[in-house]
Image (tube, rainbow, N blue to C red):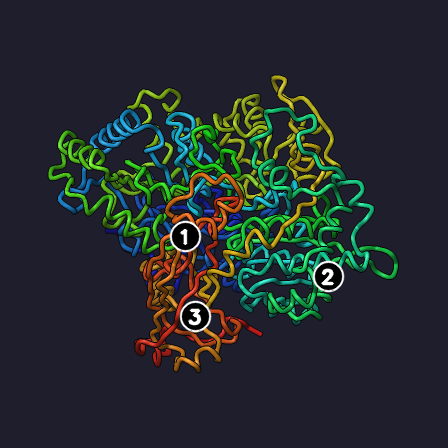
Amino acid sequence: MTKPHYQAPDQVPLPPTNAEVFTTCCDYCIVACGYKVYRWPENAAAGGNSASQNALGLDFPTQVMSGGWVSPNMHNVVTANGKRHNVIVIPDKDTGAVNVGGLHSVRGGCIAKKCYNPDTPTKDRLQYPQLRVNGKLQRVSWDTALDIFAELVDHTVTKYGEHAYAQKQFSYQFHENVYALTKFALRHINTPAFAWHDNPGNAPSVPGFRDVGFDPFGASYEDWYKADVMVISGTDPFETKTIIWNGWMMRGTQDHGQKQIFINPRRTNGPAYAEENGGLFLQVSPGTDTILHLALSRVILENGWQDAKWIKEYTSNKWESNEGFGQGTRNTPWQWRTTWGKLQTNGFEDFKKWILSQKESEVEYAAKKTGVPAAKIIAAAEMMAKPRADGSRPKTSIGIEKGNYWSNNYTNTASIASLGLLCGAGNRPGQMVSRLGGHQRGGTGGGSFPRNKSPEKFAGRRRKVLDVDKWVETGHVRLAYVVGTTWTTAMTASQALEKRIRELTTDSPHRPSRADTASAVSALKARMDAGGMVVVDQDIYLRDPIGKDIADLVLPAATWGEEDFARENGERRLRSYAKFYDAPGESKPDWWIVGQVAQRLGFEGFDWKNSNEVFEELARFNRGNRRNFQPLVMFAKRDGKTGHQALKELGTTGIQAPVRIENGKLVGTKRLHDSTYKHLETGPEGFTSDLKTVYSFNSHTGLANFIKAPWSLFSDFYEAIKPKGDELWVTNGRINEIWQTGFDDMMRRPYIVQRWPANFLEINPADAKKRGIESGDWVEASSDRVPVQVGGFIARTTREASYTGLVEAGNIKFVSAKVKLVAIVTDMVAPGVTYSLAHDGREEANALVPRVTDPMTTNYRFKLGVGKIKKVGESPYKNSFSQMSFASRTLS
């Protein structure tokens, strides 16, 4: 092998002036910072230190984080066109959007290490299809694997119906992959047993936003900068989407005095910064956010601080019910939750009357329930909505994330959205209400959910969702296709879910004993016919028990950098993710894999030759929604280009969807619901921009709806599961250094392994003292009352769907769970509250979280785990200062 031309491990080769350049974006968080990839042969000379001698056009050495600097973590060696090449992956300092100036997070700054290189810890990438034979994975050919898969799908659907085929997949992946997979499951197999990676079904993440009329991603990053007051609920952007914080919100503070109001149970860097710069930290007790929102609304209303003029112009003042909408709308989720649920108001005055009638909105009552002092509640409401002496109003924006909607899904999202309406937020610069985001957005649907096939009913109406975990629990699934997600560890009551899946799979006596197609199909069909389940796992690494020792078939996927892809970020910015190196072994992109299975089943329209063909097909299915980029494809074809070529030409700036036509040119859409976007123009081949989703709210009238959010919809569950006796809340979430389940981090990034050799549990000093716990101790978090929902598919009334109703009907079972963690004693968490890293496959706190969905939405309450905490020993990291740190993550 040719030796690198540099010797010292802390030196990085600079790209020569003739290096090839590719455009991409970070593959991790929602922000999707723009990056450039410089590639040149491994044995070729590197660039020099002067600007004229390297492709970056910079003089070196240069300052860290200056835009253009190169660290060892930004370099790798890959195989491209069959030959080894150096690659440098660095933020694009010249980008016109997102990470302007070349900013990046710790995650993105190390993304070059994600690339497959057999000389690095990525050597365990999946490279070949494998079949589990006699309990062990054995390499097979693609033809064998795909033939087995197709025959099992056919057997499942033919003998047991499409309900018996379940598909559990990412929603965040590239457009081409998500489209192909959903086209297969929803349009062709037409199964209702379909679930995204982060919940048990097909439900919207922020249903309260939907009912009010807000798109989940309506805002632009510019809005987060322009706001005078930024309300941030359920997340710390510094930890989870760093450049939104560093590049936009903090800059807002520095440039024009933006103040942030954080609503979280845990004090991290963001809340500390907010307090030091005139903002507020509302340290809310887990699960009580709705009460806080109601109290904030009450203070605004009692003082007359609401934006009356804006409310009159942009919100609905009548109960829409069924007037003029016909029978066709009677089964919409909006109708369930508002008309039949009687949650929609008759406009502002009705909403005001309702708020003032609620005990939970009384400030002193709210202070007692939420743990937020009354004075802080009043101060926050004043900061958000009180007009200034000159009559002007503060520009308030609200951004929420999973800590908000993964605790009390419906009423948290509905109450904070209605609070936004009171502040006049939702459709203008610096005054928006939106998700801040987790993953990037590639969720282009290739088919519609078959509502008429769903067995789930609520209040007599069929739901547009099926709880797949519950469907598996009750033995209805015969074949599960799991794509790019850690199914068991990512769900709630995770240990119980894994146990049940094992009962249906590895505990079965029907297992392949030979690797030939006929033998494998015969054994796996026998398992299905005996009431068991077959699992096909498609991923880039063996992760989670599903891939490691449960899946019967394992299929290797190609990923970022290994194929031409497209995706959007949290402000709907569409950009190219170019291929710049060869996928390892025989791994293939997800769209190709599912296309091959579909063709074997006789499904038409899956014979794509490349990813661009998928991109251009899916563009037609984006029309009329926030992801619409069909005009881009139409203009590309007019100019003799492919859609992917046209997108690459836009570089890391890309274009914000929905893509529109103005004055014969393509333009992006900065924010949704903005009434200034009313220009409609015809483009190539008569194609017209669809602007309804751009300038109106997502409601029947185009006006926003005030929605009631009664605490009573949640209170019985909350009272049942909250800590009792010596139990504590066991909440969970992310930290800056580790992306999601850590599939690129754990065991592959030495500095991450050293910093976090085990999962942790943050515990308040008062709680730790009572239990004799010190930082570095091993602690056990356990519970023998983790509720799991095992029935209740049909609920004729709201009460039957409630937690109390499920218990009374015998649809709840209680399981035990325990996890072993390293204690970190810190006042970042309040007394009674602990915090652990979410989705850590080594010891997942999700095991302690109830597997009972929000009855209004069928989403989980991931953040509301409960358990007893006890010391079980001293970890080897307790006195090892070279490894795990126990210092506070708050830098103030």
Q: Nearer the viewer, mark 2 or mark 3?
A: 3
Above or below — where is 789 with respect to 480? below
Kind of residue at badge 1: Arg
| Element marked by disc 2 | helix
Disc 3 secondary structure class: loop
The quarter holding residue 870 reads bottom left
- For marks 1 and 2 on the same chain, the one whose residue lies earlier in the sequence: 2
Considering depth in this image, is 179 or 51 the residue closer to the camera? 179
Q: Are marks 1 and 2 in contact (CB under 8 Å)?
A: no
- C-alpha separation, residue under disc 2 versus residue under disc 3: 33 Å
Q: Which residue is drawn at the image coordinates 42% and 40% (left, top)?
A: 793
Residue 48 percent location from the top left of the image: 45, 56
Give coordinates of residue 808: x percent, y percent: 43, 51
- The CA span between labels 3 and 1 is 18 Å
On screen, 361 above or below 644? below
Residue 43 visible in the snapshot: no
Asked whether 40 or 313 is in front, the reply is: 313
Q: Secondary structure at mark 1?
A: loop
**What residue sits right under mark 3 in the picture?**
727
Q: Residue at x 71, y 56 (%)?
A: 297
What is the crowding at mark 2: few (fewer than 14 residues within 10 Å), some, or many (at least 20)?
Answer: many
Q: Nearer the viewer, residue 130 or 57?
A: 130
Residue placed under numbered mark 1 in the picture: 851
Q: Which residue is most to the right?
A: 390
Earlier in the chain: of badge 2 and badge 3, it is 2
Q: Is residue 111 visible?
A: yes
Q: Earlier in the sequence, mark 3 or mark 1?
A: 3
**Side of 601 relative to 245 (left or right):** left
Determine the image quadrant of residue 700: top right
Q: Which residue is mark 2?
A: 381
